[in-house]
Amino acid sequence: MAGVRDIRRRIRSVKNTQQITKAMKMVAAAKLRKAQERVIAARPFAKEIQDVLARLAQAAAGARHPLLEQREVNNVAYVVVSADRGLCGGYNSNVIRMAAAHITHSEVPSQVLAVGRKSRDFFRRIGATVTDEFVGLGDEPSFFQAKAIAEQVVNLYIQGKVDEVHLVYTEFISAIGQRPVSVKLLPLKAPTEQSGPKPSYLFEPSAETILETLLPKYVETLLFRALLEAKASEQGARMTAMGSATDNANEMIDRLTLIMNRARQAAITKEISEIVGGAASLE
């Protein structure tokens, strides 16, 4: 019966774990709803500022700005957005794997601006150059946090310390679907000309001054949207992972219960056999 007691202990342990994973799934689902609402609200703004930039760039043809400057690539920076915590399935490993693949195949020196503890710890562990880190952003990243990251990125590029900046994050598709993506953040790609008549604007004081204000805001908006997409993806991945863990715990409890019943049946059968054998020896 010692085996049965051990199995009962394991069943209690699995049930306790199941309660934790079920609670984490419910918490992640509640956070996901809020994060999804923020992503949906941010997407139109990002699209609108991109359209505004396209119209202004078309009207101010020939205007120059450091963030639009194309130069020879001698150093690349990667802004890698991950989570601060685990227990979210393959969310962290997928985005980190994509960034690591880019760095590994890069023909020029690379550096990392790590957003989230998981990316910071990974790239430190493999010996990559971690220029800066942004951790503890919380469950609701703010625009001021995105602005702080954008200022660091813009300063690195304007000062010539890097010639390209890539943003690696996870795009939110649905609660059960997330996709790691990598986009070139700097230099900003000149928007394609829009159809129709060329817009006519009177720039005051100048087109360069307008771009000086608008382009950094555009970078901040891209980073803010990436943070929101990543946070919604994290919560969706955690909800899915905890749901799978809860289901696996159910299956494990069923298997352990079956094993326990078989062990009990074997023990009872053995005892009956011993009793029958003992009675037979007395005859």
Image: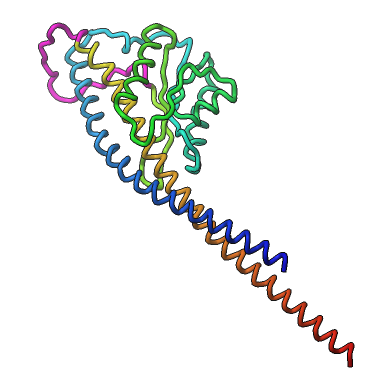
Please tell me in which quadrant of the rendered image residue 36 appears: top left
Q: Main secondary structure of the magenta part?
A: loop
Check the picture and name the quadrant holding the N terminus: bottom right
Q: Is residue 219 above or below residue 178?
A: above
Provide the residue span drawn in magenta. 185-209
Q: Is residue 77 above or below residue 265?
A: above
Residue 186 colored magenta?
A: yes
- Where is residue 174? Give x, y as percent: 36, 45
Give the color scheme: rainbow, by chain, secondary structure or one colour: rainbow
Residue at horizontal 44 percent and vertical 27 percent from the top: 135
Q: Taking 15 as reference, is 281 left or right?
A: right
Residue at horizontal 54 percent and vertical 27 percent from the top: 121
- Where is residue 7? Give x, y as percent: 65, 63
Please tell me in which quadrant of the rendered image residue 47 appears: top left
Q: Is residue 258 above or below residue 167?
A: below
Residue at horizontal 11 percent and vertical 15 percent from the top: 200
Q: Taking 217 as reference, is 136 left or right?
A: right
Viewer-closest of 40 and 267:
267
Residue furthest out toward the bottom = 283
Check the picture and name the quadrant holding the C terminus: bottom right
Viewer-closest of 232 and 276:
276
Viewer-closest of 230 and 166:
230
Residue at horizontal 52 percent and vertical 22 percent from the top: 103
Please tell me in which quadrant of the rendered image residue 22 appears: bottom left
Counting the numbered discs, the total is: 0
Residue 223 colored magenta?
A: no
- Where is residue 179? Give x, y as percent: 42, 38
- Where is residue 137? Give x, y as percent: 39, 30
Q: Is residue 269 above or below residue 244?
A: below
